[in-house]
Amino acid sequence: MNAPIALKAPAGRDCAPVLKERGQREVFCGLTGIIWLHRKMQDAFFLVVGSRTCAHLIQSAAGVMIFAEPRFATAIMEERDLAGLADANEELDRIVDQLLERRPEIKSLFLVGSCPSEVIKLDLSKAAQRLGAKHAPQVRVLNYSGSGIETTFTEGEDACLESLVPEMPVLADDAPANLIVVGSLPDIVEDQFKRLFAKIGIGNVASLPERAVADLPGIGPNTRFLLAQPFLNDTANLLTKFGAKRIDALFPFGVEGTSNWLHAAAAEFGIAAAHVDEVIAPYQERAGIALAHQRERLAGKTIFFMPDSQLEVPLARFLANELGMIPTEVGTPYLHRGNLAQELAALPEGVQLSEGQDVDKQLDRVREIKPDLTVCGLGLANPLEAEGLSTKWAIELVFSPIHGFDQAGDLAELFARPLRRRDVLEV
Ligand code: SF4
């Protein structure tokens, strides 16, 4: 096993100055989140109100086969809608009526805004109210924006979960304390965490979102929540407004992050740290063995994060502290310091952070540094590979199960694989 990892990040230390950039950016829009959200919420349907481009984006990102009956679709706005020649609200009502008649299993319908619906100022919150009143109580109709004007791709999940918060049942002031894990996790990971919380002694645990939107957890002054994803800033703010308290912790990536995350929850529920250590020791050991294999390959390698998923800061911390990688630049679309305070403090000294993007300038820096690995969007990966640089697609990190002890080795493997491929090609 490697040397033990400090479970508590040093508090209060900040990182090197942040390079703020505004310019052309290369990031998917928030519609992309529908791909993992529709798999998670099995009684929900996502209706994008958008153009053929939007339809192509989610169809190709999801790799949907033509005979599948997916739980998302696009209400395509034609030119006459965009030109204001048709009443877009009437059209939308007609499509929703048809959809709900044909798919009676839908219990929650999300109307998802896009660039075109924003451009013609189609008010989807009013549409959701109108359609919600018409189809209640069988169907709950909600709305959020996934438009590329407003959102980068993981912000789609943030906007979606934020729209669920006002729907959560309100708990009484004297209700027993409950814990909500916020962020869409693969079912297998969610189950692992619930088993761990139960062993630690926290039994009243729910997720936002649950597998059925109908099972929304309750919220009240005794509600505590842990973010599972760093890109849920608006959802966290709204949960706080509704009386819940965020538990500050590292994010559950790797042994260090997962241990810290569980310890923080246990401390909030008055459970002794020694008991948590006892419960998690076998998991830590297993994960440590899995990481040791990958450390041999990754230690000393440089890594450059282009701003993409907002997972960049916690992943850079994991790769540096547990695998010995050297982050040269850690770019993120937005740096939410409140949620990332512990993560920033746990990064190695002197890491260059950047927020926002001016893609050409950033590519110049990549070419100058020539990192061993660059984490970036799909559109940038091929050109960089052609220049001889190894890349990792950021989107793969969002689609793959990477949280928790049991996934720590797989997470490291995602970064080791492109380097191994490069070695093979060079041989
Ligand atoms: Fe493109 Fe905007 Fe549609 Fe996203 S929402 S696919 S950025 S048109």
Image: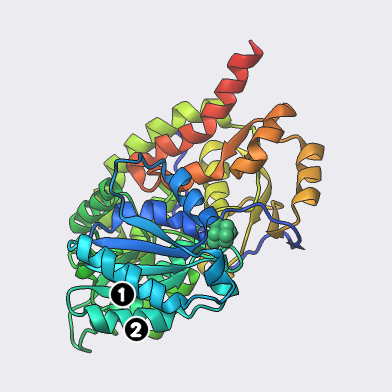
Residue nearest the observer in this picture, 49 or 181: 49
Q: Position of residue 113 (x, y in %)?
A: 48, 69
The residue at the point 44 percent across, 47 percent down is 59
Left or right of residue 402: residue 336: right
Q: Look at the image and tell me in which quarter the C terminus lies.
A: top right
User: Would you name the residue on which mark 1 appears?
Assistant: 141
Q: Are the residues tagged 2 and 1 within 8 Å (C-beta)?
A: yes
Numbered mark located on residue 77 in the image: none
Q: Amino acid at mark 2?
A: Gln
Q: Position of residue 408 (x, y in %)?
A: 40, 40
| Chain-order first, disc 2 or disc 1 | 2
Q: Position of residue 90 (x, y in %)?
A: 39, 78
Q: 197 above or below 415?
A: below
User: Toward which corner of the image does residue 42 lie, by quadrant?
Assistant: bottom left
User: Toward which corner of the image does residue 254 lie, by quadrant?
Assistant: top left
Crowd class of label 1 (few under 14; some 14 to 19; many from 20; radius 10 Å): many
Crowd class of label 2 (few under 14; some 14 to 19; many from 20; radius 10 Å): some
Residue nearest the observer in this picture, 65 or 260: 65
The residue at the point 45 percent across, 30 percent down is 292
Q: 372 above or below 62?
A: above
Q: 309 above or below 81?
A: above
Left or right of residue 235: residue 197: left
- Mark 2: which secondary structure? helix
User: Would you name the residue on which mark 2 appears?
Assistant: 129
Label 1 lies in ligand 1 vicinity (Cβ under 8 Å): no
Alpha-carbon distance for marks 2 and 1? 7 Å
Asked whether the viewer can see residue 29, the reply is no
Asked whether the viewer can see residue 38, the reply is yes
Residue nearest the observer in this picture, 125 or 82: 82
The residue at the point 38 percent across, 42 percent down is 64
The residue at the point 34 percent across, 37 percent down is 285
**Ligand 1 rendered quadrant:** bottom right
